[in-house]
Image: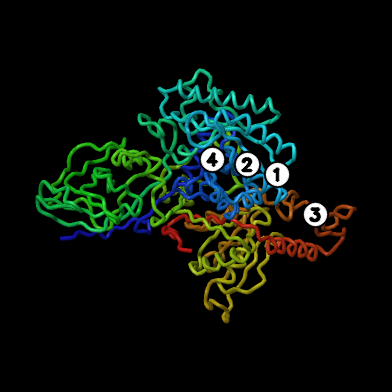
Amino acid sequence: MSVTTSWQSQEPSERSAVIDLSAVWHNVVRLTQLARGRKLIAVVKADGYGHGAPEVARTALSAGADLLGTAHVSEALALRYAGITAPVLSWLHTTSTDFLEALEHNISLGISGWELHAILSAARETGKTATLHLKIDTGLGRNGSTAAQWPDLVERVVAAQNQGLVHVEGIFTHLSVADEPARGDETMEQLNALTDAVRIARKAGLKPTMIHAANTPALLSADQLEDPDYILRDAVRVGLGIYGLSPFEDRTPKDFGLIPAMTLRTRVANVKAVPAGHGVSYGLTYRTETPTHLALIPLGYADGVPRVATGAPVHIGGRVYPVVGRIAMDQCVIDLARGKTVTPEGIPAGTPMVDEAVDPMVHIGDEAVLFGAGDHPSATEWADASGSINYEIVTRVSPRVPREYTSHSHLTLGDVTVSRSASALAAHSLPQDPRPTRDSSGESYTQPNWTLTRYPASAEETQLIAQKLATHLKAGDLLMLNGELGAGKTTFTQGLGAGLGVREGIISPTFVLSRQHPNLPGGSNPGGPDLVHVDAYRLDTAADIDNIDLEDTVETSVTVVEWGTGKVEHLSESRLVIDIVRPRGAVGAPSAAFSLDYEINRAAGETAKTERAGTATIEPGADISKALAALNEEWDESERNTDEPRTIIMRGYGPRWSERLDL
């Protein structure tokens, strides 16, 4: 007999790898602290170790990473196509590597020697100077120039630099046994060889500013060295630590203050009673010892679960059950008679409290977690069960498993919105409960239920996303819209208006604070709610918001408030917070450097000279309404004409948005 339950969690998908971007942010902050002022290269190769390269890259940059690292140029180009303009270093090339495209997109190149000819040809063809990091093989035996080849490589690079074809930014190596601190002598030999290579390069006339060797294990163990500076050098190149995993067998992520970012989860697909001696999976390598229930977990080796990981743990409802029998392509099986309760420390303890052959504690539809943070089993436990390492466990999760992104913090996870001050980053605390909770005043839900990120490449795509969102909206919905001037807030709101079927003519409400756009009976959504568009930039408190009487319209309209954080949350127990982020390196248009009130006073004729707001000229004594209309027109035009990629980050708060949107 199969057993089902009426309870379902708020997670909508049947299987997913849930990526906690606030954990990534936290880990980068922690690693930045350990780096002691060195540049931090965030390695996002292999699709961000399976976590999603663009999402991890943006989060890492916002948390203080200085540049990104990928193995292949194709991976770096994917970041560029996603709108990320921060520095990227790629170091593993083949004869098919597109160096022309790399230089066109300002990708720095790590080279071992043979690539130099192709790179110089690309530099001549594109007219761009190639930024290089020279790699010395100090003992790993993979990529990099050998010590014997090094002087010749340096000589050729110096000649190319003198011709203006290349610029040498860095010299680096890869450590072989940094994850085995007891083998420190071998690591020291590699570091000495790196020092010799740098000395030769500088003597020949190169002036590298970024010498790097330390990977995650080297960074985490640097404090055990007599001279940590000798391994940290100018920059650290970290991968595994960003994702909250430990490279050491005897130390957990918690020991280093790291938080695992990936949770691999699904739902129990079947539960059935079976007698003693019943076989499980191909080869019948396992038979039940007593009458019991078997539960089917719909993840297998096609999803990236190692086929040989029999005995690996699955966490369901506060208990851990081992996988029994062989793992199949699409599924694996657990024996409910072998479950153990999880203690607060996350360690299974005790024996079953009931006869699971009679009353199974697992039901169809219950959430099953293979690995994650906190009380969940770890990726390392799955690695141990399969004779592998945790690096492989997370990177092998297949594209068949959807990635779902969440954030438990209040950060805007964009390239330009988070302070990069180390002290400010370190001071930020990250709540651990992803479910919505009331704050101390009881006025609003303080934790998002989910985070959804989209990457429109144009104003038209931004509006299409907003139009699709509009189909999910109804009267009483509150949207808080954030983004710098020119980010695309008005463009987004215009898309909402089109989807809601309200009167056209949506422009920035900056100078009137609030505009109401009525629903059109003959429009695309007759009978739908009106749209109220508010700019709270010049309002300081929630009391100021009350003065414009939003409470009179909030229940009958869709209310969109720009710059409303800390001012409008009291209007509704639920809200959508939408951040629109321009890529790093984008130039704001028009400039946000002036005070709006100051410019309004000037436009009203309070100065004797002709002044400028943005680029629109305002004469003293001019009609203020015409002057402000000119500014609005200029700002709106700047949004329409700027087709830079954007990042749109949506977060749902409160019971209205308990389920993640499907956009």
The answer, for residue 79, to whether it is visible in the render is yes
**Is residue 411 shown to the viewer in this render?**
no
Tell me: 24 left or right of 365: right
**Which of the pair 21/428 is nearer the observer?**
21
Q: Earlier in the sequence, mark 2 or mark 1?
A: 2
Camera-side mark, 2 or 4: 2
Point out the frontmost of discs 1 and 4: 1
Determine whether the residue tagged by mark 3 lies in a helix, strand or loop: helix
Task: Specify the label residue 42 is tagged with.
Answer: 4
Q: Quickly name the residue at label 1.
A: 129
Circle 2 crowding by C-alpha within 10 Å: few under 14, some 14–19, many from 20: some
Residues at marks 2 and 3, CA–CA distance in whole angstroms:
60 Å
Mark 4 surroundings: few (<14), some (14-19) or many (≥20) residues within 10 A: many
Q: Earlier in the sequence, mark 4 or mark 3?
A: 4
Residue 153 in the image: state x and y as whole percent.
62, 34
State how far apart marks 3 and 1 are (Cα): 48 Å
* Residue 13 place in picture, x, y as percent: 37, 59
Amino acid type of disc 1? Thr
Which residue is labeled 2 in the image? 116
Q: Check contact, mark 1 vs mark 4: CB within 8 A.
A: no
**Residue bearing the label numbered 3:** 601
Between marks 4 and 3, how big is the CA–CA gap?
Answer: 47 Å
| First reached walking from the N terminus: tag 3 or tag 1 | 1
Task: Name the kind of residue labelled 2 in the image.
Answer: Leu
N-terminal label among 1 and 4: 4
Amino acid type, mark 3:
Asn
Residue 183 in picture, x, y percent from top left: 42, 23
| Circle 1 Cα neighbour tier, 10 Å, few/some/many (<14 / 14–19 / ≥20) | many
